[in-house]
């Protein structure tokens, strides 16, 4: 599932490869999928988008927004996005396909669940989208120490760090995937309670969020996810399905996997303290 680093990488790649291209054809909702969500009627996307030129791509949290004339396209985390050169084989299953007048295509499809939307700018009042747009990105200077410390309050004191960091869109784009290495680098256990952190520990966690997400983004995303050209990112995940059962890179203890709060957590029981 793409999260903040991968969405930032996708937006950058779209700016490099797709901007300036004119949309010649649109196929929406081609393959039925129960958990593919659309804004409004996807059959209207063709008339909304055809003839428009892609001018910009931006990421908000784990979402990628593309501007095409006065319309916006929005792909939420959970959507795979690929660029295909003219003549290359397109995937059989997809929920949104844009064909450009010089031949290439941009194809989006959902694996488990995800949103693929097109709408006139300003009309999408989806809360998840608006919150992601409004809150500061951990990659920006607006996400500073004071802002981060303000997230700790009475209401969050009893939450585990997994719940605190990766739910309720408290930090949009910080999901259960990137969470694992953020906590590993901070030497904190996913079940540690947010209210038990000292001021120094809050600082350590803040630095880890910034540094880990910056490194993941600079390296083109995590190696567990694919980019716009279908290539895995160059950031080697320390804790993921790829490293479970392997020795911790710091102390050699075998990395554990456990089901927790609707998803797997991975940790080193020696390095990461509750
Ligand atoms: Zn360890």
Image (tube, helix red, strand yellow):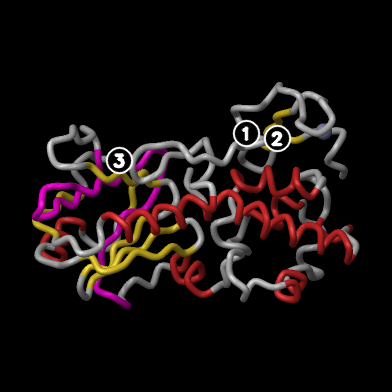
> Is the C-beta separation of discs 2 and 1 under 8 Å?
yes
For mark 2, does the 10 Å Cα neighbourhood hold few (<14), some (14 to 19), or many (20 or more) residues? many
The quadrant holding residue 262 is top right
Residue 33 — which label?
3
Residue 83 position within the rendered picture, expressed as x and y whole percent measured from the top left: 27, 45
Q: Residue at x 51, y 51 (%)?
A: 3
Q: Residue at x 48, y 43 (%)?
A: 1
* Vertical relation: 223 (above or below) 156: above
For mark 1, does the 10 Å Cα neighbourhood hold few (<14), some (14 to 19), or many (20 or more) residues? many
The quadrant holding residue 249 is top right
Q: Is residue 117 left or right of residue 213?
A: left
Residue 186 — which label?
none
Which corner quadrant holds the C terminus? top right
- Tag count in the figure? 3
> Is the C-beta separation of discs 3 and 2 under 8 Å?
no
- Which residue does the numbered mark 2 point to in the structure image? 266
Q: Residue at x 75, y 46 (%)?
A: 185
- Which residue does the numbered mark 1 point to in the structure image? 240
> Which one is in front in this view, the residue at disc 1 or the one at disc 3?
1
User: Magenta includes 106?
Assistant: yes
Q: Is residue 48 left or right of residue 257?
A: left
Mark 3 falls on what kind of element? loop
Ligand 1 visible in quadrant: top right
Q: Which residues are magenta?
A: 94-122
> How much space separates mark 2 and mark 1, taking CA atoms?
6 Å
Nearer to us in this view, 160 or 102: 102
Mark 2 falls on what kind of element? strand
Residue 194 position within the rendered picture, expressed as x and y whole percent measured from the top left: 81, 58
Q: Is residue 271 left or right of residue 231?
A: right
């Amino acid at each position: 599932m793409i999260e903040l680093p991968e969405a930032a990488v996708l937006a950058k790649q779209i700016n490099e490869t797709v901007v300036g291209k004119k949309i010649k054809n649109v196929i929406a909702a081609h393959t039925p999928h129960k958990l593919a969500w659309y804004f409004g009627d996807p059959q209207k996307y063709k008339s909304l988008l055809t003839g428009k030129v892609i001018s910009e791509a931006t990421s908000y949290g784990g979402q990628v927004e593309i501007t095409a004339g006065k319309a916006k396209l929005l792909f939420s985390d959970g959507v795979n996005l690929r660029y295909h050169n003219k003549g290359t084989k397109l995937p059989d299953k997809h929920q949104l396909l844009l064909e450009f007048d010089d031949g290439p295509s941009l194809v989006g499809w959902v694996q488990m669940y995800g949103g693929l939307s097109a709408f006139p700018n300003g009309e999408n009042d989806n809360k998840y989208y608006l919150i992601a747009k409004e809150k500061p990105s951990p990659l920006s200077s607006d996400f500073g120490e004071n802002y981060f410390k303000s997230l700790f309050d009475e209401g969050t004191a009893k939450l585990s760090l997994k719940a605190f960091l990766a739910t309720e869109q408290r930090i949009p784009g910080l999901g259960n995937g990137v969470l694992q290495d953020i906590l590993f680098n901070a030497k904190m256990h996913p079940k540690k309670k947010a209210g038990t952190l000292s001021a120094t520990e809050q600082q350590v966690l803040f630095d880890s969020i910034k540094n880990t997400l910056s490194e993941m983004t600079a390296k083109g995303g995590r190696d567990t996810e694919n980019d716009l050209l279908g290539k895995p990112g160059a950031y080697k995940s320390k804790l993921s399905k790829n490293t479970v059962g392997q020795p911790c890179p710091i102390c050699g203890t075998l990395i554990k996997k456990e089901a927790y709060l609707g998803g797997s957590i991975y940790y080193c029981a020696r390095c990461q303290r509750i």
